[in-house]
Image (cartoon, rainbow, N blue to C red):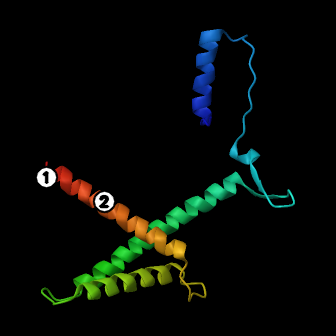
Amino acid sequence: MNYTLQQLKDRVETLIEQQGENAHCAAWIYTKEDCHLKDENGDAMKQLAEIEKEEWERKERSETVLRRYNHFYNEECSGMPHGTPITPEHMQAMALECMVDALICENMNVEYNVIAIDDIKDLIAGLYKQSDEFLERVRKNNE
């Protein structure tokens, strides 16, 4: 089982109350500083803390790209005169163009001519989440 240190402390305090502070026990505690990934030769590659940092950075990056996408898309759509006849294909093309612009903007200081599939998937997931949250707010307002 995995616990936070606070949860572990609470569990130990409960056990002390139930069994007394002199009851015998055994425990193994591993924190993220104790865990390493090993390569095929058994050499440590990364600590778990580094992996968590990379995941956090990727999440932050994804949220930044989503904000930029929304900005570009809103600018593109709001710049069109009201009642402009467009097809669904126009809307799809605008969405893709805004996606590419947001990703290029995120990588401005880097030689950039390839878009990582993970960046696109993260943006798609963010758009789904954003639309689900909007629909939930609309549902609650209509109740």
Residue at horizontal 44%, vertical 80%? 102
Q: Which mark is residue 106?
A: none
- Position of residue 47 measured from the top left corner of the image (x, y, whole percent): 73, 54
Mark 1 or mark 2: whose residue is earlier in sequence: 2
* Among the 4 quarters of the image, the one containing residue 71: bottom left
Whether residue 21 is situated above or below residue 121 in the rendered picture: above
Q: Which residue is mark 1?
A: 142
What secondary structure is marked by label 1? loop
Pick out the residue farthest to the right: 41
Residue at horizontal 62%, vertical 27%? 9
Q: Amino acid at mark 2?
A: Asp
- Position of residue 111 measured from the top left corner of the image (x, y, whole percent): 60, 88
Q: Quadrant of the N terminus?
A: top right
* Among the 4 quarters of the image, the one containing residue 53: bottom right
How far apart are labels 1 and 2 at the CA level?
A: 15 Å
Q: Which residue is mark 2?
A: 132
Q: Amino acid at mark 1?
A: Asn
What secondary structure is marked by label 2? helix
Whether residue 61 is situated above or below residue 76 in the rendered picture: above
Whether residue 122 is situated above or below residue 107 in the rendered picture: above
